[in-house]
Image (tube, helix red, strand yellow):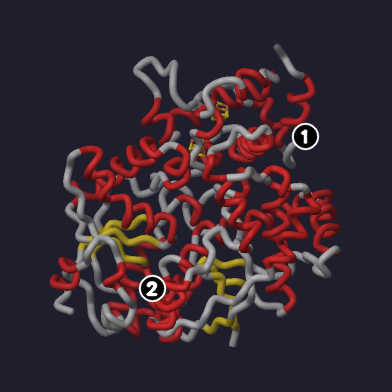
Amino acid sequence: MTEYKMFEGCTIGNRIPFVEAASRKVFEILNIQTSQAPFSCCPDPTGMKSFDNNAWLTIGARNLSLAEEEDKNIISLCNGCTNTLRGVKHQLKHDSSRKEKVNAELAKIGKEYKGSIDVRHFVDVLKEKSDDIKNAITKQLSNLKVACHPGCHYMRPSEWMESDDPMHPTTLKEIVTISGANIVDYGVEALCCGSAVHNAYEEHGLQILKEKLDAVKKSGADVICVNCPACFQQFDTLQRNVSKKFEKEYNIPILYLTELLALAMGITPDEIGLKFHRIRLKSVIEKLEL
Amino acid sequence: MIDFEFRKQVMDYHMGSNIIKYCYQCSRCTDYCPVSKVTKDFYGTTGYDPRHNILNALLGYKEAIFSSDPLTIWGCTVCDTCDELCPQNIELTEIFTFLKNESITKGEGPDYLYSQAKAIFENAKAIPSQSAIERRRQQLGLPAVATPNVKEIQTLLRNIGSDKKLKEE
Ligand code: SF4
Ligand code: SF4
């Protein structure tokens, strides 16, 4: 049985652990085995990479080397972590002088980057488990209308993410469909949530988020389904700020893909801490008669 | 003023970043940029503009990039749409990474990035563990997060010289 090294990432591990709880429960049902490793920050592909690309490469390569020591692939719960770890692999594969420099630094702490393991986004792993998911569904979510937001770094840049169509993604929708839920098309699915620019220019981040929320609202979706903690935070914590700034009511609940699947697999909202969401899921729970 | 050294740095920065010279200013990058969409005025003369950045980087107009509104560099939300849609396959965001790294070294980047780098330097995590969240993890039946080796991360960052870019808060 293949066992993955779990890369939950800083945001899920240390801020929204309920997402990890849902993910681990779903993985257990689907027989996706994981173990921990003392990974550091990935680090952030929009943060640390912008700060110092060399530091980003070196810390990323160190994380990869930890999984290499155990000869296990990484499963990541986060778009950003996946993007970093795959991006580091990509740069070091195609740039031997950078690889030499990085390894010279790693040697000073007794580590070496080889490039021998793969980094998988959990969505891509779930896609391969479609049949198992189908068999594990005990509650069809057929009452639910879902707007899917896969998030930029799950599929872009396609050159090194190698996952989904970069501008017309389908995988998240395919997996949500297995739960029996209905997908609503809202037109701007491949648009960014505005997370990175929000950190530097709050106003512009909120404007981008508003464009997204307006489209979702118009589509009549009950819930937005995401597969990235940065997007989750953007939608869940900043929706109120958008309401306030633009004097318009937004109150659309968010479900992480593994939370949605957990509910469809008969796991209760309490077990996975859905009460910790900022936007209340009351409407969803009532609709699904949970 | 044209800065030839800066031009060379851009061309040499990344594997294949010299293909920036094939930019024919079609503006597809700017047309699909979500930040340009919300910041440009009617005539498109103000606001965030990736096409301008590519042009200025290509021509070596360093001042046009670094001596103007920080939005010029830091407006980018790294959605990677431009990389995907550029007909010349220019990896715009890699060139923007170079510009951002330069801006950080000058001490002109946005505060949150200095704070994030500091958090990583001090805790090996951008978001350090907190006791309230640790308790919540327990309640949810989760194992404790495996503790990263902070000393190793600090050694790496010091040896690279990344620690010198940090700011005192
Ligand atoms: S899309 Fe590419 S070729 Fe067109 S202006 Fe932008 S960088 Fe230049
Ligand atoms: S990566 Fe940056 S410049 Fe390119 S489209 Fe996205 S926000 Fe605009």
Residue found 39% across the figure and 58% down from its top: A170
Judge depth for marks 1 and 2 and give the one in front.
2
Q: Which quadrant is home to the C terminus of chain B?
A: top right
Q: Position of residue A55 (x, y in %)?
A: 71, 51
Crowding at dot 1, Cα within 10 Å, few <14 / some 14-19 / many 20+, comes out as: few
Q: How many marks?
A: 2
Apparent side of residue B129 relative to residue B62 in the rendered image (left or right)? left
Mark 2, residue position: A18
Q: Decide if residue A250 is on the left or right side of residue B161.
A: left
Question: Subunit of mark 2?
Answer: A
| Numbered mark located on residue B130 in the image | none
Residue at image coords 34%, 17%: B42
Q: Is residue A271 left or right of residue B58?
A: left
When asked about the image quadrant of residue B34, the answer is top left
Q: Is mark 2 within 8 Å of ligand 2?
A: no
Name the spot of residue A64 as percent of width and height, x first.
69, 67
Q: Is mark 1 within 8 Å of ligand 1?
A: no
Whether residue A169 is visible: yes
In the image, what residue occupies the spot 73% across and 56% down? Answer: A58
What kind of residue is marked 1? Answer: Asp
| Residue in front for this viewpoint, B133 or B61 | B133
Seen at 22% across and 43% down, the residue is A244
* Depth check, front residue: A150 or A283: A283
In the displayed structure, A212 sits above or below B105; it is below
Question: Which of the 4 quarters of the picture holds residue A109?
Answer: bottom right
| Amino acid bearing label 2 | Phe
Residue marked by disc 1: B12
